[in-house]
Image: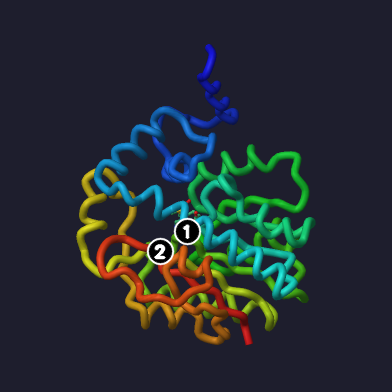
Amino acid sequence: MIGVMPETLPPPGIDVTKPNIARVYDYWLGGKDNFAADRKLAEQLLALDPGMRDLVRGNRQFLCAASARAARQGGISQFLDLGAGLPVSPAVHDAARDVIPDARFIYVDDDPVAVLHTEALLSGTTGLESIRADLTDPDAVLTDPVTTSALDVDQPVGIILGSVGHFLPATRMRELTGAYLSRVKAGSWLIISVGRAEDDDPEQNLKPAYTAAQTYRHSPEDFASFFAGTDIVPPGLAAARAWVAGVTEQVPSAGLFMHCGAGIKR
Ligand SMILES: C[S@@+](CC[C@H](N)C(=O)[O-])C[C@H]1O[C@@H](n2cnc3c(N)ncnc32)[C@H](O)[C@@H]1O
């Protein structure tokens, strides 16, 4: 049919009749790895909060910009992406590989569907790995055979926690960033974004359609504390697009935004 793009074929073994939040993200990001059920939920969520699409796009821009900067400025050639979702549209590894073409990535997610889909997308690639693990268990992530064979522990690592920290209480996030940082070399980069709102409404808006996970609102002080033991790189802790543009500005006083930052382990 003229003018209609064919639907991407689902990877074998994946049930695409049930929506999956990683693929909902892919749809908002403008990707092709999503299916009718995902698009339906994505549109329902957009009806409740039209800003979601822009929010996730800004977030992915930040993750790509920060990873490219870690590669360029810090020579980081290996990344651990915790709570990765689908590595597409645009993929964070592509941004780092524009700087260091053989940069290695280990994508970590605990959602079996996202992991299966990621494995299918990455099959046949070199230096891009996917594991199913709970990021709140650093031992499980770091002793996974895929991680131990792909990561060079004598070299700094880029640790990415993109749009996932709001699923954990601040105390747990602090413990976790401390635990991961304690296991990597000085010079490693910590790249974090969390969804935040100064007012309550955006989260409440989404609850009727998407109640998959409990979320936490981290104060600016809590967010800064996740970077303990690092030197935060300019422009500091900022909303996604401000970070990418390199400007410091007041974070929005209403509505959801992504609070973003990167730090280098001392
Ligand atoms: C909102 S998506 C973010 C995707 C991507 N990092 C980004 O920022 O575009 C959050 C992802 O984190 C994963 N996730 C949530 N809790 C996790 C956990 N405890 N361990 C591993 N992955 C987790 C979810 O399955 C989901 O794919």
Residue type indicated by callout 1: Asn
- The residue type indicated by label 2 comes to Met
When the figure is inspected, residue 225 is found, relative to residue 200, above or below; the finding is below
Q: Which residue is mark 2?
A: 258
Residue of label 1: 59
- Which residue is more in the foreground, 260 or 114? 260
* Residue 148, image x, y percentages: 72, 63
Which image quadrant for residue 250?
A: bottom left
Would residue 208 be found to the left or right of residue 102 on screen? left
Label drawn at residue 67: none
Residue at screen point 28% across, 49% down: 49
Asked if disc 2 is less than 8 Å from ligand 1, the answer is no
Please tell me how crowded label 1 is: few (under 14), some (14-19), or many (20+) other residues with Cα within 10 Å.
Answer: many
When the figure is inspected, residue 66 is found, relative to residue 124, above or below; the finding is below
Contact, CB < 8 Å: mark 2 with mark 1?
Answer: yes
Residue at horizontal 43%, vertical 43%?
28
> Which quadrant: the C terminus?
bottom right
Marks 2/1: CA distance? 6 Å
